[in-house]
Amino acid sequence: MADRGSYSISAELVRERSILRNVYLWMAGGLALTGVVALGVSGNPAIVRALASNPILFFGLIVGELLLVIFLSSQMARLSAPAATGCFILYSGLNGVTLSLVFLIYTQASLATAFLVTAGTFAGMSVYAMTTKRDLSGIGHYLVMGLIGVIIASVVNLFLRSTALYWLISYAGVAVFLGLTAYDTQIIKRWSRELSDSMSEQEYIKISILGALKLYLDFINLFLFLLRILGRRR
């Protein structure tokens, strides 16, 4: 008969796997919704013309997505589980609308190749983060600095239009988001260990959505940077 200590360890592992599984299910659901919306919008000429011919509308959607991510990340503790769920679904759908133009720029073969490479590298970094004994928390501020650098360089290159800088940004972006994938995965694993079994269902859903949002952003951005490297335009 198992003693109480063994039971506690077993219960914690089951809980941890459950949270991790829920995070990946939410992330996969968000990615699926984004893909469906992107395909639907890219197949609608009227919507495509509206997005392509109206920069204010297109960049307004991007700003709206950014504000929604900031709101969801900062206000998760105050939101109800249904509200958090609704925000995540809304963000996934809006991202599909803006990504629809990417589906028109690159060939289907390029999109499929970039997605498969993204899925493989993302899975590899996630497995590494969950199995390594190394604490990755120390690299967090370096990754944030790298991300800020990529964003600033991208804005600067909108005016310079330098091919060399374009490729440097692309490879740097891949490196940053591979690191963030491992870093965020380990954060979610740490959340799992620190949460008690008394967590309410509302809290369980919200922490799962917050974790899913982190990994969703890592996956999407990794995909976009790899697409810049591997993709072939129509």
Image: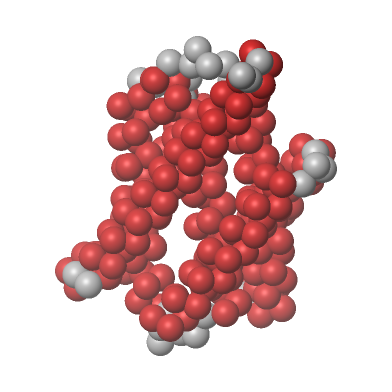
- Given residues 57 and 109, the one toward you in this image is 109
Q: Is residue 18 visible?
A: yes
Where is the C terminus found, in terms of image quarters?
bottom left
Query: Which residue is drawn at the image coordinates 39% and 81% (left, top)?
Result: 108
Q: Position of residue 162 (x, y in %)?
A: 67, 77
User: Looking at the rendering, which quadrant does residue 221 occupy?
Assistant: bottom right
Image color mode: secondary structure
- Given residues 4 and 32, the one toward you in this image is 4
Q: Is residue 12 visible?
A: no
Where is the N terminus found, in terms of image quarters?
top right
Query: Which residue is drawn at the image coordinates 30% and 34% (left, top)?
Result: 86
> Residue lying furthest front in this view?
1
Q: Position of residue 164 (x, y in %)?
A: 71, 78
Q: Position of residue 168 (x, y in %)?
A: 72, 71
**Total number of numbered labels?**
0
User: Looking at the rendering, which quadrant does residue 9 occupy?
Assistant: top right
Query: Which residue is drawn at the image coordinates 43% and 16% (left, top)?
Result: 200
Q: Is residue 111 left or right of residue 176?
A: left
Q: Is residue 98 above or below residue 108?
A: above
- Given residues 200 and 100, the one toward you in this image is 200
Q: Is residue 4 left or right of residue 146?
A: left
Query: Which residue is drawn at the image coordinates 41% and 43% (left, top)?
Result: 26
- Given residues 3 and 66, the one toward you in this image is 3
Q: Is residue 98 above or below residue 65?
A: below
Q: Is residue 69 above or below residue 120?
A: above
Q: Is residue 41 left or right of residue 68?
A: left
Q: Is residue 198 left or right of residue 156?
A: left
Q: Position of residue 159 (x, y in %)?
A: 60, 68
